[in-house]
Amino acid sequence: MFIGRAERVVNSEGILVRSRFTCGYCHQRAYLAARLLRHSGIEAVVYGLNGHVLLRFHIDGADYFTDPDYGVGPYAYSDDPQFLHRVVLNNYAKASWLNAETIAGMATSYEDNAPYGEYLDIIYEEQRAGFRLARILANLNMALAIVAFGTALTIAYRLRRSATSSQTQLVAQ
């Protein structure tokens, strides 16, 4: 029971959960959105900027970006850094993000922008294995506690019975 609660608490703090889209970090949200688009037949890649992760997808011969974490986009990709800077700045500013200039700078720093490693399925499976092991260990711990408690009760009962029988013998003498 505690482990289930702990799992829910950890999940609400950003651990990848396939069943919902209410938490996560930028790369996790982009990863989930990419999986949804690919499932719909749209070519999509989780794309890392310098310090932030977006979703890059391809439709009708054009590349677009969207930011599932910030709820921004889609907006068209451009090889022209000045044009792209204006487009990104405009999209994030419309969404009232105060760090629009920072994101626009990241988007136009092409040398460090690349597809982001799609290793989250591995992480997800490792997390599930960890929670399974934690459940097993918690149940084992509970069983050991029950055995220890039962042993303590047995010892206490025998000590009390021994003390009672010693008192009875003293009274009889």
Image (cartoon, rainbow, N blue to C red):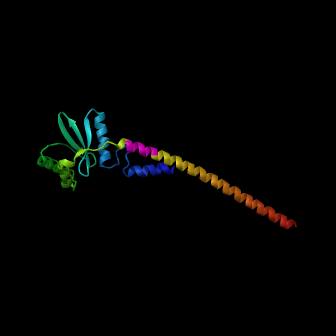
The answer to which quarter of the image holds residue 78 is top left
Q: Position of residue 48 (x, y in %)?
A: 25, 47
Is residue 63 shown left or right of residue 151?
Answer: left
Considering only vertical position in the picture, is 169 above or below 83?
A: below
> In the image, what residue occupies the spot 41% across and 51% down?
10
> In the image, what residue occupies the spot 13% across and 47% down?
81
Q: Position of residue 145 (x, y in %)?
A: 60, 53
Q: Residue furthest right?
A: 173
**Residues in magenta, as a range:** 122-129
Considering only vertical position in the picture, is 76 above or below 105?
A: above
Q: Nearer the viewer, residue 9 or 146?
A: 146
> In the image, what residue occupies the spot 25% across and 34% down?
42
Q: Nearer the viewer, residue 82 or 39?
A: 82
Q: Position of residue 3 (x, y in %)?
A: 49, 50
Q: Position of residue 32 (x, y in %)?
A: 32, 42
> In the image, what residue occupies the spot 49% across and 48% down?
134
Placement of the C terminus among the 4 image quadrants:
bottom right
- Is 127 covered by the magenta stretch? yes
What secondary structure do most residues of the magenta stretch adopt? helix
- Is 28 covered by the magenta stretch? no
Is residue 78 shown left or right of residue 158?
Answer: left
Give the mark count: 0
